[in-house]
Amino acid sequence: MKLVLATRNDHKLREFREALPRMEILPLPDEVELPAETGETFADNALEKARTAHKATGLAAIADDSGIEAAALDGLPCVRSARYAGDAATDEQNLQKLLDEVAAANGDRRVAYVCALVHVTGDGEEWLFEQRCTGRLATEPRGSGGFGYDPAFIPDDYDDDRTMAELRPDEKHAISHRGRAARAFREWLESRS
Ligand code: IMP
């Protein structure tokens, strides 16, 4: 089955291909412009991206919108995760801002990654799969795997103190918000066939 992935993020393309090995996941054609992420929820943003990819290509599409929520910051940065330190901010700058703000807050280091995955079928039906991965924020970044906030995200699912950036890719997929959403989507697809 062919699916267009509505993203310009090569990390996501790689992670979805690894998580859905039996699908042919196509990158979004260069000429298709993705909508600005102005929604108030991950689901709103994922829906707009998946609809855009489906309308532009006529193919079944998937899109995800994801981010991190910090308990000490009442859930921020949430849908602003990719540009928390400014529109042109790097992953390192976004992570440093989160570390600084959580350090200055109330000592609560609980965080969660959230992934909303929207699938638009070839016929235009729309389906949402939303999953979370909980953890706590390290005081300093560690590790070189993954991307974004991974160097400071210590998942609850393993008994050691490794950050997401210190896990092997298969260990990250097994527990991550995106891996869980991709599996929920895969199970749903299999239940329909
Ligand atoms: P978007 O889903 O493309 O809007 O980007 C979400 C942002 O959330 C990314 O730029 C990262 O900063 C962060 N993020 C989402 N998923 C992950 C992950 O698996 N690891 C680390 N950071 C993530």
Image (cartoon, helix red, strand yellow):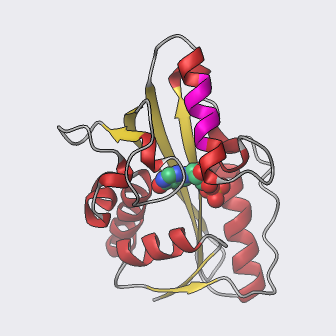
- Residue placed at 69% from the left, 79% from the top? 54
- Residue placed at 71% from the left, 77% from the top? 53
Please state if 188 lies on the left or on the right of 8 as rendered: left
Question: Where, quadrant-wise, is the C terminus in this rendering?
Answer: bottom left
- Residue placed at 45% from the left, 72% from the top? 16
- Residue placed at 72% from the left, 70% from the top? 51
Please state if 35 lies on the left or on the right of 177 as rendered: right
Residue 138 rendering spot, x and y as whole percentages: 40, 33
Q: Reply above or below: 42 against 47.
A: above
Q: Main secondary structure of the magenta part?
A: helix
Q: Residue furthest left?
A: 159
Q: Residue furthest top?
A: 106
Question: Where, quadrant-wise, is the N terminus in this rendering?
Answer: bottom left
Residue 192 rendering spot, x and y as whole percentages: 38, 74
Q: Reply above or below: 136 against 114.
A: above
Magenta-highlighted residues: 95-101
Q: Reply above or below: 35 against 89.
A: below
| Number of numbered callouts drawn | 0
Residue 131 makes an appearance in the image: no
Please state if 123 lies on the left or on the right of 88 as rendered: left
Q: Reply above or below: 90 against 169.
A: above
Closer to the camera in the image, 11 or 42: 11
Residue 139 makes an appearance in the image: yes
Residue 69 rendering spot, x and y as whole percentages: 55, 34
Within the magenta stretch, is there residue 136? no
Closer to the camera in the image, 152 or 60: 152
Res 40 quadrant in image: top right
Closer to the camera in the image, 99 or 51: 99
